[in-house]
Image (cartoon, rainbow, N blue to C red):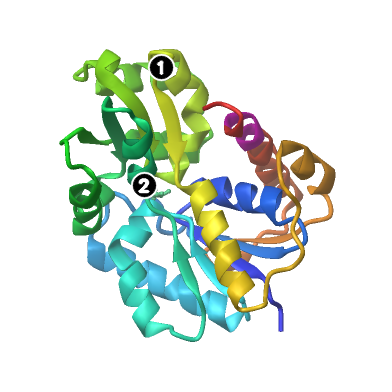
C-alpha cells in the first residue's frame, strides 16, 4: 500500500497545489502527475478532457493512492462530479476558482476571474458565479496564452507583460478589488500581475482552500499524518525530506535535469506564494 496523495494537472500548474500541500503536510508522501502528453486541457473539448482525467485517476488508484487531488480548475469543472460517482473507493478533491471568498472580500468592488477557455465556458463555474454574485460584480476572462508561456518556462518577459497588458486593457481596473487566479498555471505570473494591477487589487487562488479540504477529508478517514502549522519556513526546512514521485503522463521522471527543473519551479512558486 503506497498511501501517497496523488496530485495531477495537465502540466506544471499542478505544482502550485503540490507546493502548498508540501508546506502544510510535510509528513505526507506524494505522487505528482503532469499529463504532458495532453497539455493544454483548457482549449480541448470536454469529452477529451474527461477521457484524460479518467485515465489519470485510474493510474492513481492502480498506484494505491489514498486520495486524488485534481490540481486543475479545468479538469474539476469538466469531470470532478462524474469521476466522484464513478470511483467511489477513493476521495477525489478538486481545485476550483476561489470566487466565493473573492466576492466576500471585495467589499463591493468588482472581481475579475481569469481562467482557461474551457473553465470559463463550463456550467460549473457559471453556476458558482450565479450562486455567490448577487450584485453582479464578477467578470470572467480567458487567458490561454499563460498556459503556453508557463509550459515553455517563460515566466517573466516582455511578451508575457504585453500579453497581459493587452488582455487587461478592456477593464477599468481601478473599480476592481480582487483577481481570482482560476487556473493553476497562472500562479507563476503573480509578479507580472502585481506590477500591472493597482495595489488595492488582491490576488487569490484556490490552492490553499483545496489543501485544507484535503486535510479535512483525510482527517475524517483517519488517514492524515501529523502536520505542521505550515508556512514558508516549514517548506524550506522539510523540502528535502518530503517524498514526491513525479510522473509525466504515466512515465516516472528519473532524469536529473528534469528533476532539477522541477526544484527550480518549486523555488519560483515559493516566491510567488508570498505575493498577494
Ligand atoms: N492548470 C489547469 C487549470 O488549472 C489547466 C491548464 C491547461 O491545461 O489549459 O485550469
Would residue 10 be counted in the magenta stretch? no
At a point 30% along the width and 59% down the height, the residue shown is 77
Label 1 sits on residue: 200
Secondary structure beneath dot 2 equals: loop
Residue toward you, 187 or 207: 207
Give the mark count: 2
Q: Is residue 38 above or below residue 193?
A: below
At a point 73% along the width and 64% down the height, the residue shown is 28
Mark positioned earlier in the residue sequence (1 or 2): 2
Horizontally, is 67 left or right of 98 in the view? right
Percent position of residue 118, x then y? 25, 51
Q: Residue 234 occupies which quadrant of the picture?
A: top right
Residues drawn in magenta: 268-272
Residue 34 visible in rendering: no
Label 2 sits on residue: 97
Q: CA distance from mark 1 to mark 2?
A: 20 Å
Main SS of the magenta part reads: helix
Percent position of residue 3, x then y? 69, 76
Residue toward you, 274 or 75: 274
At a point 70% along the width and 57% down the height, the residue shown is 25
**Badge 2: residue crowd in 10 Å (few <14, some 14–19, many ≥20):** many
Amino acid at each position: 500500500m503506497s498511501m501517497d496523495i496523488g496530485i495531477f494537472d495537465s502540466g506544471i500548474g499542478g505544482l502550485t497545489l503540490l507546493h502548498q500541500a508540501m508546506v502544510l503536510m510535510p509528513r505526507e508522501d506524494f505522487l505528482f502527475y503532469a499529463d504532458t502528453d495532453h497539455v493544454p486541457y483548457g482549449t480541448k473539448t470536454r469529452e477529451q478532457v474527461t477521457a484524460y482525467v479518467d485515465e489519470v485517476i485510474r493510474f492513481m488508484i492502480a498506484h494505491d493512492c489514498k486520495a486524488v487531488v485534481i490540481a486543475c480548475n479545468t479538469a474539476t469543472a469538466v469531470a470532478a462530479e462524474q469521476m466522484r460517482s464513478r470511483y467511489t473507493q477513493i476521495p477525489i478533491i478538486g481545485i476550483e476558482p476561489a470566487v466565493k471568498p473573492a466576492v466576500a472580500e471585495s467589499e463591493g468592488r468588482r472581481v475579475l476571474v481569469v481562467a482557461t477557455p474551457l473553465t470559463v465556458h463550463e456550467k460549473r463555474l457559471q453556476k458558482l458565479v450565479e450562486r455567490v454574485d448577487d450584485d453582479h460584480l464578477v467578470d470572467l476572462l480567458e487567458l490561454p496564452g499563460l498556459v503556453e508561456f508557463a509550459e515553455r518556462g517563460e515566466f517573466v518577459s516582455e511578451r508575457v507583460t504585453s500579453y497581459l497588458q493587452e488582455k487587461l486593457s478592456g477593464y477599468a481596473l481601478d473599480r476592481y478589488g480582487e483577481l481570482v487566479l482560476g487556473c493553476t498555471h497562472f500562479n507563476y505570473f503573480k509578479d507580472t500581475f502585481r506590477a500591472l494591477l493597482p495595489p488595492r487589487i488582491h490576488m487569490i487562488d484556490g490552492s490553499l482552500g483545496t489543501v485544507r479540504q484535503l486535510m479535512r477529508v483525510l482527517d475524517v478517514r483517519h488517514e492524515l499524518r501529523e502536520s505542521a502549522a505550515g508556512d514558508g519556513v516549514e517548506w524550506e526546512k522539510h523540502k528535502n525530506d518530503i517524498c514526491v514521485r513525479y510522473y509525466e503522463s504515466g512515465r516516472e521522471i528519473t532524469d536529473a535535469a528534469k528533476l532539477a527543473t522541477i526544484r527550480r519551479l518549486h523555488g519560483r512558486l515559493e516566491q510567488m506564494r508570498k505575493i498577494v
